[in-house]
Amino acid sequence: MREQYRKSAKSDEPFVWGASTSAYQIEGAATADGRGPSIWDTYCRQKGKIANGDTGDIACDHYHRYVEDVALLRDLGVNAYRFSISWPRLLPRGRGKLNPLGATFYDRLIDELLAAGIEPWICLYHWDLPQALDDEGGWPHRDSVGWFADYATLVGHRYGDRVKRFATFNEPGVFSLFGYAFGWQAPGLTDRQAFLRSVHHVNLAHGAAVDALRGAVRDAKIGVIHNLQPCHAASDKPEDQAAAATLDLYWNRAFPDPQMLGYYPERLADELAPYTLPGDLAAMSRPIDWFGLNHYSPIYARADQTGVLGFAWAGPPPDLPHSGVGWHVQPEAFRDTLIAVSERYRLPVYVTENGTGGKDAPDAQGRVADGDRIAYLDAYIGAMQEARARGADIRGYFVWSLLDNFEWGSGYRDRFGLVYVDYSTLRRIPKDSYHWYAAHIASDAAARATDPHTPPKP
Ligand code: FCB
């Protein structure tokens, strides 16, 4: 076993244990210090879009409580923290003049992390497009490529002296499908053309941002984050099988293939031909340093000709194990996805999100006993270690998420944090899973201290 790990260890860098969050989900302070509105501020105000009418206006108030949150990260023992920058906090109208107060917030956060011995990993885009840019056409407009490249340059110049790890996008497959084809996320469109245009422009924006960051930051390690899951048909019917293949195309292939392999799957190339100019594929497939994989659970589709893409979402089979938010729990799917990603894209893989949601609550003693989450993390981290043992080049694991937070369409109903947040007082309570993850990281570090070849603990 030990020998197997040695063979799969493709790097001398210590395995990275981390935690992830995103700006709109935790920061709050939606109008503080000159922040402009994002498409999520607008979307949350549309009636019936978010459970309970919730918004990210206050969220975890991380903007004002980041010192406490960095202390939680430090005590958790993580080596790295992945967060996203709120584009409209830096550029309230998406482009033009920098908002100095917004930019200072991230200076302070980064400095606090470095002082705690935690490496900051910045994600440029976790879904909060400045509303002003959506008003000008948003991702369906080809000018978005230049807007994003300029924003990437600004972030690189501002923080690149202290930050070397950058991701361009978080889950382009998710925000374009849900935001432009299904209408379940901002900006809430159900428009096939807007969806296809967004796919192409986000791919181009990724390539342009890679170039921008390379130009702005010496020694940058640049990656991109994709949510990849096995796509299954709701039944054996041929039309449902075709629906699952379509979901797989848009969810799993539409972004990583052009970005890393330099081509679109054939069917997509035909669909995108009207928007594709000579040189586009070369421009989107700029060399990068790592692949960020977000993984939760297999997903299911059925045929539906009333949907703009000809398919609809389906629930997982009821007889399979489920998480507290109804997602199918299947660690082997994680293992197999990791192996497939490592083989297909030939890049070091970092798991940039994995975790589980539920309706956690403190008991009478104030303890949050989230045994389900511990069982999930134990099984999924074990599956990851199996993938490593089989040769997948996996260099790190970031749990989603540090804190309970604004979970998009479910608002504050579904909790994914290692730390419970009482939204009425904003008090943080580390859950049992927080202590479990801290012990897991500590025992891995202790094993490494005695034998540098010891693999991370399953
Ligand atoms: C991912 C998102 C993240 C969070 C988790 C549960 O798709 O990137 O923001 O919502 O799901």
Image (cartoon, helix red, strand yellow):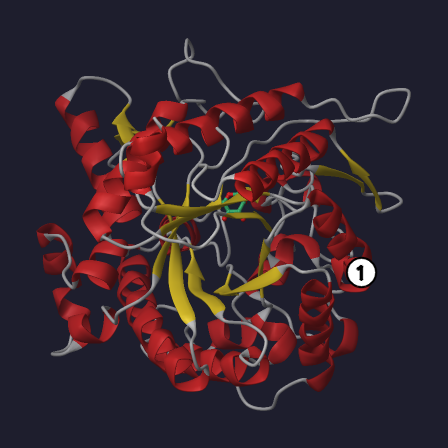
- Residue 231 location in percent, x, y? 28, 32
Identify which amino acid the numbered label 1 is placed on.
Val
The answer to whether residue 229 is visible is: no
Name, please, the residue furthest toward the top. Answer: 319
- Residue 389 location in percent, x, y? 32, 32
Q: Is residue 11 above or below residue 419?
A: below
Q: Tell me where residue 300 sits by quadrant.
A: top left
Q: Is residue 119 above or below residue 369?
A: below
Q: Which residue is mark 1?
A: 67
Q: Is residue 341 above or below residue 23?
A: above
- Residue 329 location in percent, x, y? 45, 22
Judged left or right of residue 429, residue 260 is left
Give the residue drawn at x 48%, y 28%. Answer: 458
Judged left or right of residue 54, residue 144 is left
- Label 1 secondary element: helix
Give the residue drawn at x 32%, y 58%. Answer: 195
Q: Tell me where residue 66 sits by quadrant.
A: bottom right
Depth check: 199 or 284 in front? Answer: 284
Beta carbon at label 1 within 8 Å of ligand 1: no
Judged left or right of residue 5, residue 61 is right
The answer to whether residue 360 is visible is: yes
Q: Tell me where residue 40 sits by quadrant.
A: bottom right
